[in-house]
Amino acid sequence: MNETGSYAATRELVLSELHTALNSIDSAQVEQLIDAVLAADQVFFVGVGRVLLSLQAIAKRWAHLGIKTHFVGEITEPAITDRDLLIVGSGSGTTLFPAGIAQKAHQIGAKVVHIGSNPNSGLKDIAAFMVRIPVRTKYYLDDEIDSEQPMTSLFEQSLLLLGDIVAKMIIDRRHLDMKALWQYHANLE
């Protein structure tokens, strides 16, 4: 077998793409996101497919920091209010369900933040701001970072890692004791 397609070559390709993608995120937008998260009473997440899986992992990790997190559609989802934040994960910004939920949250008065790639979607009119991960979407915009991975894998991976980076930044900002975080971890194990 030649090097192309081997585990080592593919691993380096994926890590290189992630390095490029994460380096392309505006740090001021990340700081703005952290401010919004810490100012909110509750943080809600909405997305579909693999994006939703990344958002659920982020919600879980942020809950370990003492942040009240929920994802739209969970059976115990409480009401969103004007003191809350909705994070919309959508690379294209045009996915029907997240866009509709964003509109509803905006009407209620919740702050809406879009984490995605397409700055020209309809979400730009209702989101307080966007955290842009400028990687390939289904629209293949001219300024998107291309990927050799299938479909929008690079967006979903970058989103998950961004969530963990933000968690670490919140830990540092709040001077949280890492051992004390276990009080928020599930204990029915």
Image (cartoon, helix red, strand yellow):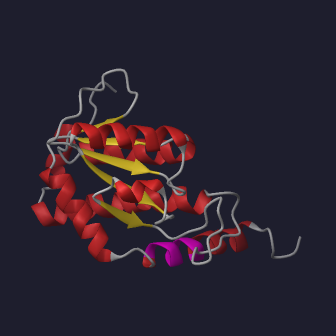
Can you name the residue that lies furthest to the left here? 175
Percent position (x, y) of residue 112? 30, 50
Residue shown at the point (65%, 58%) measured from the top left: 138
**Position of the N terminus by quadrant:** bottom right
- Specify the segment rendered in magenta: 16-22
In this view of the protein, which residue sits in the foreground, 69 or 134? 134
Can you name the residue that lies furthest to the right here? 1
Please give left or right for residue 140 compared with residue 70 in the image: right
**Position of the C terminus by quadrant:** top left
Percent position (x, y) of residue 168? 26, 62
Picture layout, residue 189 above or below residue 162: above
Picture layout, residue 82 above or below residue 113: above
Residue shown at the point (72%, 66%) measured from the top left: 7
Please give left or right for residue 78 compared with residue 114 in the image: left
In this view of the protein, which residue sits in the foreground, 134 or 171? 134
Percent position (x, y) of residue 114? 38, 56
Can you name the residue that lies furthest to the top here? 75
Residue shown at the point (58%, 63%) measured from the top left: 154
Most common secondary structure along the magenta stretch: helix
Please give left or right for residue 177 compared with residue 69 in the image: left
* Magenta span includes 109: no
In this view of the protein, which residue sits in the foreground, 185 or 92? 92
* Magenta span includes 18: yes
In this view of the protein, which residue sits in the foreground, 15 or 48? 48
Q: Quadrant of residue 6?
A: bottom right
* Count of numbered labels shown in the rendering: 0
Residue shown at the point (19%, 44%) measured from the top left: 67
Percent position (x, y) of residue 14? 62, 69
